[in-house]
């Protein structure tokens, strides 16, 4: 069974988005929440968190009310670019 990692897009007071991660199998306290400032850090942290469960991970996305549609779109675009880059790297290796 996959672990569910909550990924919440948030916005700081100056309008910069970030993603807060939470492993739903752990206690809900500040020590178990991880802040990611970009997609590369996000991917790294999800991989590390998932390693505890053999890489069997599901992501539950949400966003806070103060996050704008533009910020959500920016996260999506960066995620798509990251995934395309990872796919290209895999194809080069093969």
Image: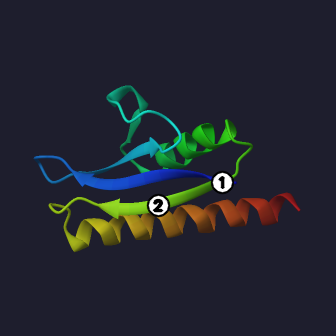
Q: Is residue 70 above or below residue 49?
A: below
Mark 1, residues whose alpha carbon is within 10 Å: few (<14), some, or many (≥20)? few
Which residue is drawn at the image coordinates 17% and 47% (left, top)?
12
How is colour applied across the structure in the image? rainbow
Q: Is residue 21 above or below residue 74?
A: above
Q: Secondary structure at mark 1?
A: loop
Q: CA distance from mark 1 to mark 2?
A: 12 Å
Quadrant of the image containing the C terminus = bottom right
Please state which of residues 94 and 62 is positioned toward the viewer in this rendering: 62
Circle number at residue 2: 1
Relative image position of residue 2 (x, y in whole percent): 66, 54
Which residue position holds label 2?
A: 60
Position of 52 with respect to 93 (left or right) is left
**Which quadrant of the figure has residue 85?**
bottom right
In contact (CB < 8 Å): disc 1 and disc 2: no
Quadrant of the image containing the N terminus = bottom right
Which residue is drawn at the image coordinates 61% and 37% (left, top)?
48
């Amino acid at each position: 069974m996959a672990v569910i990692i909550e990924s919440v897009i948030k916005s700081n007071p100056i309008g910069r988005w970030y993603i807060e991660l939470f492993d739903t199998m752990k206690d809900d306290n500040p020590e178990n929440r991880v802040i990611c400032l970009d997609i590369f850090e996000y991917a790294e942290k999800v991989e590390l968190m998932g390693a505890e469960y053999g890489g069997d991970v599901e992501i539950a996305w949400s966003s806070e009310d103060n996050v704008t549609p533009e910020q959500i779109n920016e996260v999506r675009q960066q995620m798509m670019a990251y995934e395309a880059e990872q796919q290209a790297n895999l194809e080069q290796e093969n």
